[in-house]
């Protein structure tokens, strides 16, 4: 399949320094709220890119759960591929893409596990079937077929018919951002790109990048 003839010209917005805040988090909150208000499917979905200790990359979609001054939080299986890579290499990046708004946000930083109490609280808020699934799935491991999962779900459901504790291999991570880049599509591929770089003393330096 050749897609070289397909084109889009971006004309829905602009991003100029005069309208941008001096720090990135208020702008991120504004853009995420706009994506939610626009009714986009899972606007809090983000690509998480990790790498092994020797630099082999991998990426997948995960869900943002909180974004505040401490960082960007998501939850997963510690024994998954992303979990093992984060254990070996704590540097990671996130990408939000809201095509209908012609916007992207790239986030780079260092990831660490959050505390057990915070992970417990979020796990308790999940639907019952999702909590069972966290026990049943040996995420990223090779299995023979889907029947393996179905049997594990049945077994775990019998073990925990009501209250489901958080598995020790499951919990939250928080990426403390050192770089955020905001991308707004513009006509003729002359896109707006504003980058925020965190300097010592929690000071953010803002600059424009060429498209």
Image (spheres, helix red, strand yellow):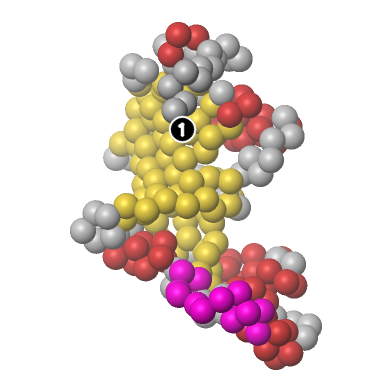
The residue lying toward the viewer, choosing from 45 and 141, is 141
Q: Image check: 42 left or right of 111?
A: right
Q: Please, which residue is most extreme toward the right here?
A: 162
Residue 76 against residue 148 in the figure, above or below: above
Q: How many marks?
A: 1
Q: Residue at x 34, y 20 (%)?
A: 209
Q: Image check: 158 left or right of 208?
A: right
Count neighbours of disc 1 (C-alpha within 10 A) and say few if under 14, some if 14 to 19, many if 20 or more.
Answer: few
Q: Can you give x and y, in whole percent of width and height, for residue 68 in the image? A: 54, 45
The residue lying toward the viewer, choosing from 84 and 123, is 84
The residue lying toward the viewer, choosing from 97 and 168, is 97
Q: Magenta stretch containing residue 46, yes or no?
A: no
Region rendered in magenta: 139-151
- Residue where numbered disc 1 is placed: 1
Q: Please, which residue is most extreme toward the top here?
A: 188
Q: Residue at x 34, y 63 (%)?
A: 85
Q: Image check: 132 left or right of 69?
A: right
Q: Can you give x and y, in whole percent of width and height, for residue 175 in the image? A: 43, 52
Q: Residue at x 57, y 68 (%)?
A: 119
Q: Can you give x and y, in whole percent of width and height, for residue 108 in the image? A: 38, 43
Q: Is residue 177 visible?
A: no
Residue 204 against residue 163 in the figure, above or below: above
Q: Quadrant of the C terminus?
A: top left
């Amino acid at each position: 399949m050749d897609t070289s003839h397909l084109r889009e010209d971006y004309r829905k917005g602009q991003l100029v320094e005069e309208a941008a805040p001096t720090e990135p988090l208020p702008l991120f909150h504004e853009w995420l709220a706009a994506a939610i208000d626009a009714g986009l499917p899972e606007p809090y979905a983000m690509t998480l890119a990790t790498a092994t200790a020797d630099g082999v990359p991998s990426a997948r979609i995960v869900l943002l759960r909180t974004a505040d001054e401490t960082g960007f939080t998501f939850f997963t299986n510690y024994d998954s591929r992303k979990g093992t890579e984060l254990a070996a290499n704590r540097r990671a990046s996130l990408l939000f893409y809201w095509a209908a708004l012609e916007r992207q946000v790239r986030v780079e930083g260092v990831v660490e596990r959050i505390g057990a109490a915070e992970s417990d609280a979020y796990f308790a808020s999940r639907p019952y079937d999702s909590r069972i699934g966290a026990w049943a799935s040996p995420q990223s491991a090779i299995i023979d077929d889907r029947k393996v999962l179905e049997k594990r779900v049945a077994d775990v459901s019998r073990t925990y018919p009501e209250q489901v504790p958080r598995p020790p291999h499951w919990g939250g991570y928080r990426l403390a951002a050192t770089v955020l880049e905001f991308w707004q599509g513009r006509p003729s591929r002359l896109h707006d790109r504003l980058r925020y770089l965190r300097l010592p003393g929690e000071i953010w330096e803002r600059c424009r990048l060429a498209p």
